[in-house]
Amino acid sequence: MAIEDNPISRVRYGEELKRRREAAGLTQEELSQRVVMSRTHIAHIEAGRRRPDVEDARRLDRELGTDGFFERFLPTLDGRKVAEHFAEALEFEGKATVIKEYAPSLVPGLLQTKRYAYEVLGTGYPRQSDEDRDKLVATRLERAGILGNFHSPEVCFLLDEAVLRRVVGGPAVMCEQLRHIAELGESRRIRVHVLPYSVGAHALQAGFLSLMWFEDMPPIAYAEGVNSGRLLEIPSVVRGCQELYDQALGDALSHRKTMGLLRSVAEDYEHEAQRADHS
């Protein structure tokens, strides 16, 4: 699915913020204090590396007297059809040099096969038409294009065992999905670790987490819940998320043992699908 043309780019958005700030006679530090944002975040927005959220944009408009400009043009910075709360994280994903994700119950979007993604995107509210679901699936598969480059980004997935055991779309879909993950892992394109049920409670049990590192900006974290997601940029908060990820990773199976488990569970699904076909 092609990315739509944006009426205003992030760079132009940032240039406009810088122009309006300087016209108001404010430094980045002075503006940051007035709109309750960090100076670093404002600097990244002006450089086109970040975008404000809706509340940030409203505060910028109020302080700079810009008649709703910064809020009004936020939607034009998004091109792909994704959940609104994920749109900003998606842009960072394409720029990351290292990505580490934890998935509590479903296969992460970057790893989903077409049939698995179609089933996942058929759930939720509001209900999607077949045409809209096809567009969402296309976008999700397009995201996986970043795995086409063997060297960058470096990607590690930490999967709760529930990801393997939750049957999405039936045993045939699950067999295909788990073998896809195993093939990526065995080709050394990604690293995968499973947190087995036997671990019990663990550091990341609260929900989905994505950690991203970049060449020219600080690392960030993205945490997701039910119909909600939050981009985390404060360094101490991001470091805390990294520590939680490392703790959970320490309880997980090795990459080699995970590959064996994926193949074994996929074979079980294959046998189940064959039995269903002959029943």
Image (cartoon, grey):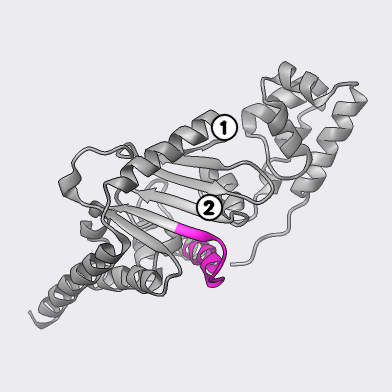
Residue 46 horizontal side relative to residue 276, left or right? right
Q: Residue at 17% x, 75% y: name it.
A: 273
Q: In this picture, which residue range is highlighted in magenta? A: 137-155
Q: Position of residue 63 (x, y in %)?
A: 78, 19
Q: Residue at 81% x, 34% y: name it.
A: 17
Q: Nearer the viewer, residue 51 or 152?
A: 152
SS of the residue under disc 1: helix
Give amino acid for label 1.
Answer: Pro
Q: Is 5 a magenta residue? A: no
SS of the residue under disc 2: loop
Q: Position of residue 170 (x, y in %)?
A: 22, 67
Task: Name the disc covering residue 235, or none.
Answer: 1
Closer mark to the observer between disc 1 and disc 2: 1
Q: Is residue 158 above or below residue 66?
A: below
Q: Is residue 135 above or below residue 24?
A: below
Which residue is under mark 2? 82
Q: Position of residue 268 (x, y in %)?
A: 15, 71
Does residue 194 appear in this view? yes
Residue 265 horizontal side relative to residue 229, left or right? left
Q: Position of residue 256 (x, y in %)?
A: 29, 66
